[in-house]
Image: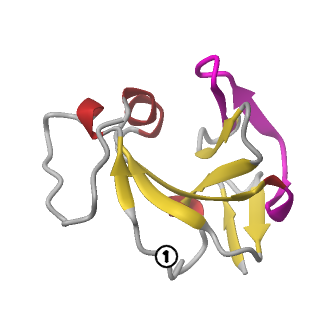
């Protein structure tokens, strides 16, 4: 069971499902909203229990992002046409047991760092 929360604790989430697709996103939207790279994994919508007042923001016509209105923690990413939801690995309480499988949107990464961990990279 993975459990997590926002910084202030108003929003909590948990899943007993095995998270899929752990990745580090380097897109400009994640960098602006998270202040850097956003690490996440996803599960089926029905496998993630969320409690608390999530504020959803339609960041593009394709997806929305969920955060806490009180502390600003960016916790979730949900594609409009997908039956999965991504959650922030950094918001998980304690160890995750998860290893990042890929870097995504590396064509948009900031120029202030290098990716040198040997994990596969996807341009988009």
Query: In terms of depth relative to the viewer, which is nearer, 92 or 82?
Result: 82
The residue at the point 63 percent across, 24 percent down is 62
Disc 1 marks which residue? Answer: 98
Disc 1 element? loop
Query: Which residue is painted at 76% across and 61% down in the image?
Result: 13
User: Residue 108 sits in which quadrant?
Assistant: top left
In the rendered image, the vertical position of residue 53 relative to residue 4, given as above or below: above
Instruction: Work out whether residue 46 or residue 13 is closer to the camera in this orientation and state it.
Output: 46
Please give the range of residues in magenta. Answer: 46-67
Q: Is residue 62 visible?
A: yes
Rendered residue at 51%/82% (across/down):
97
> Is 50 colored magenta in this rendering?
yes
Determine whether, in the image, residue 25 is placed left or right of residue 78: left
Q: Is residue 109 left or right of residue 15?
A: left
**Magenta segment includes 70:** no
Task: Please tell me which residue lies in front, 27 or 90.
Answer: 27
| Residue 7 shows up from this direction | no
- Write down the quadrant of residue 100 in the picture: bottom left
**Which image quarter holds the N terminus?**
bottom right
When the figure is inspected, residue 115 is found, relative to residue 101, above or below; the finding is above
- Give x and y (percent) for residue 21: 52, 61
Say which quadrant the C terminus sits in: top left
User: Where in the figure is residue 121, as x and y percent of width and height?
Assistant: 27, 51
Q: How many marks?
A: 1
Using the image, determine if residue 100 lies above or below residue 103.
below
| Horizontal and vertical percent position of residue 20 | 59, 65
Name which quarter of the figure residue 123 lies in: top left
């Amino acid at each position: 069971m993975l459990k997590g929360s926002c910084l202030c604790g108003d929003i909590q989430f948990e899943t007993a499902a095995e998270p899929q697709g752990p990745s580090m996103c380097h897109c400009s939207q994640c960098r602006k909203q998270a202040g850097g790279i956003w690490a996440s994994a996803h599960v089926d919508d029905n496998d993630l229990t969320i409690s608390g007042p999530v504020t959803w923001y339609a960041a593009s016509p394709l997806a929305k992002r969920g955060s806490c209105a009180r502390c600003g923690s960016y916790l979730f990413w949900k594609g409009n046409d997908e039956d999965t939801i991504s959650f922030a690995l950094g918001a998980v309480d304690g160890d995750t047991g998860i290893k990042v499988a890929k870097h995504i949107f590396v064509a948009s990464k900031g120029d202030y760092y290098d990716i040198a961990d040997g994990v596969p990279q996807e341009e988009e």
